[in-house]
Image (cartoon, grey):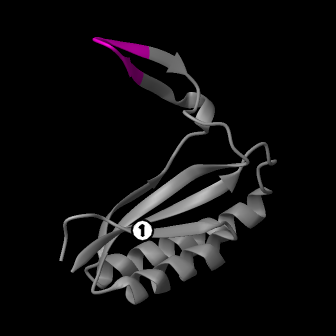
Amino acid sequence: MKQYLISMYQPAGADRPDPEFLAGVMREVDAIGRELREAGCWVFGNGLHAPETATVLRPKGDEVLVTDGPYVEGKEYLGGFTVITAPDLDAALDWGRRYALATTLPVEVRPFQGEG
């Protein structure tokens, strides 16, 4: 089984969804997580704080420059991720589709290097 990263992207600067909508999304996401665990495909996953909470460490010669904020500015940012195992890309894409439908967010599925 190969490992895949399922990344969920949120629009930058968008208002937080209303609590009722968000509760429905979280129920769906939790259900997918339970199914992944039951299928033996769950490795790890969680949501991330907003990009403003990031700290960037950039090498400069023998020093490391530390700055606040995201590495890049963009219209979307990584809001959360899940690492799964799946027999192939098609199976991983099926899980990714479920996350996209549940969250209504763009989702990227990417295989890890050096496996299977």
Q: Is residue 68 above or below residue 73?
A: above
x and y percentages locating residue 58 in the rendered image: 42, 23
Of the pair 94 and 63, the residue shown nearer to us: 63
Which residue shows up at 42% across the image and 72% down it?
Answer: 33
Q: Is residue 62 magenta?
A: yes
Residue lying farthest to the top in this orientation: 63
Q: In the displayed structure, does residue 65 sit left or right of residue 85?
A: right
x and y percentages locating residue 40 in the rendered image: 25, 80
Q: How crowded is mark 1: few (under 14 residues within 10 Å), some or many (20 or more)?
A: some
Q: What residue type is labelled 1?
A: Arg
Which residue shows up at 32% across the image and 13% down it?
Answer: 61
Which residue shows up at 53% across the image and 67% down it?
Answer: 108
Residue at mark 1: 110
Stretch in magenta: 58-65
Q: In the displayed structure, does residue 6 sit left or right of residue 63?
A: right
Q: Main secondary structure of the magenta part?
A: strand
Residue lying farthest to the front in this orientation: 61
Instruction: Place residue 82 in its image quadrant.
Output: bottom left
Q: Is residue 47 above or below residue 38?
A: above
- Tag 1 secondary structure: strand
Could you tell me which quadrant the N terminus lies in?
bottom left
Q: Does the magenta stretch include residue 43?
A: no
x and y percentages locating residue 94 in the rendered image: 48, 86
Of the pair 96 and 49, the residue shown nearer to us: 96
x and y percentages locating residue 106 in the rendered image: 64, 67
Which residue shows up at 56% across the image and 81% down it?
Answer: 97
Instruction: Place residue 28 in its image quadrant.
Output: bottom right
